[in-house]
Image (cartoon, rainbow, N blue to C red):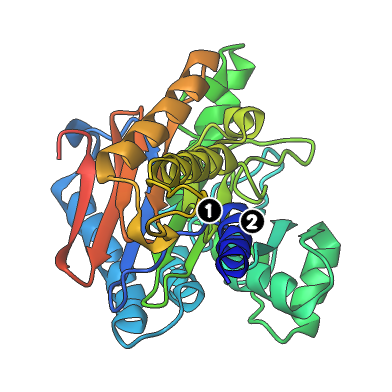
Amino acid sequence: MRAGIALAIATLFAATQLAAQPAAVQGRWTLVIHGGAGVIERDRLTPEQDEAIRAALNAALESGSAILREGGASLDAIEAAIRVLEDDPNFNAGLGAVFTYDGTIEHDASIMDGRDRSAGAVTGTSQTRHPITLARRVMTESPHVFLRGSGADQFSAEQGLEQVDNSWFGTERRREQLDEFLAREAEEVSAYDIDFKYGTVGAVAVDMDGNVAAGTSTGGMTGKRWGRIGDSPVIGAGTYADNRACAVSATGTGEYFIRVGVAHEICAQIRFRFEQDLADARASVPVDAEGIPEYYVHASEFGLQPNEVQEIADRVMGEMAALGGTGGVIVTTPWGTATYSFNTPGMYRGMAASEMDANVAIYGDE
């Protein structure tokens, strides 16, 4: 009898070791958004711009929060929040995205479901009003993860997604930025050193069932050439979600986020820390003379503390910074911990949760 019990306990222990997963805090949800990181300082924004950006962030938070507070899915919430930001010309995504070197606008986007790590991504699209929705359709309605250019545009049209002329996305402000970029290049000054890399939008969320999701959408970098692709559509670099750890969306100098694999690296380190803490707790359980544990430690009893999540996000961002990269990330975990980490003067950002009022911020000292 005791041998049978021991076998059952050992089997359960081994299975949970292989799939140790944080338990959701039932009935709670969290949503975090960003609208880009960079040289965002008070003397660079007019009071009117500051007000408009905060209003847009609040609108995006409310769009996603309305879904989560009614028990909706994290995937639906992040898509809704990002669509709001894609329609706001203050951000480098959808309407108001930056121009390429050739004077066109190309969008990148990705989305990921933490339940089974399914994902969808697109790059170089030119006619889809909401690239984040197209990325989700790639995930749910195609056998693929990543589509590009004309093929992605064709798939979008076949899916019946809203199409617009490429000129619809352009704004005078973005045209002026391209003109400045080209002028600096003509003077043989490194145009990429100017703050033309930022404005990407993204969202991460955990719903009442403990499922995490992440999404990111961008127009890329002003003056990009030769089909350049940044981190935003690259799963593991700019976007990642895994119910065993967290959801991450990134913004900044994409080449460095790709080199470090920032989004996946943060999730991996959170997962490894969680699993190690769980293993240590189980190893500390007293056993009787026959090796039977006096009690069983379940994964649901654990969750990393907010300072641990912050430490991991900061460390990975520090690794990227050491290579020369700048930008920021937003992170949330299955147990509801949420944070930002950025190494730039500011980041457009916002957070809402079932147990806190929504708040938005722009500058680094907020």
**Residue at position x 31%, y 47% from top?**
339
Q: Amino acid at mark 2?
A: His
Compared to 114, does 136 lie above or below?
A: below
Q: Which mark is residue 97?
A: 1
From the viewer's perspective, tell me whether residue 283 is left or right of residue 217.
Answer: left
- Tag 2: Cα neighbours inside 10 Å, few (<14), some, or many (≥20)? many
Q: Secondary structure at mark 2?
A: strand
Choose between 280 and 338: the one closer to the eye.
280
Name the residue tied to disc 2: 107
Compared to 65, does 271 lie above or below?
A: above
Instruction: Report x, y in % for residue 72.
Output: 41, 84
Q: Are marks 2 and 1 in contact (CB under 8 Å)?
A: yes
From the viewer's perspective, tell me whether residue 191 is left or right of residue 333.
Answer: right
- Tag 1: Cα neighbours inside 10 Å, few (<14), some, or many (≥20)? many
| CA gap, disc 2 and disc 1 | 8 Å
The residue lying furthest to the top in this view is 188
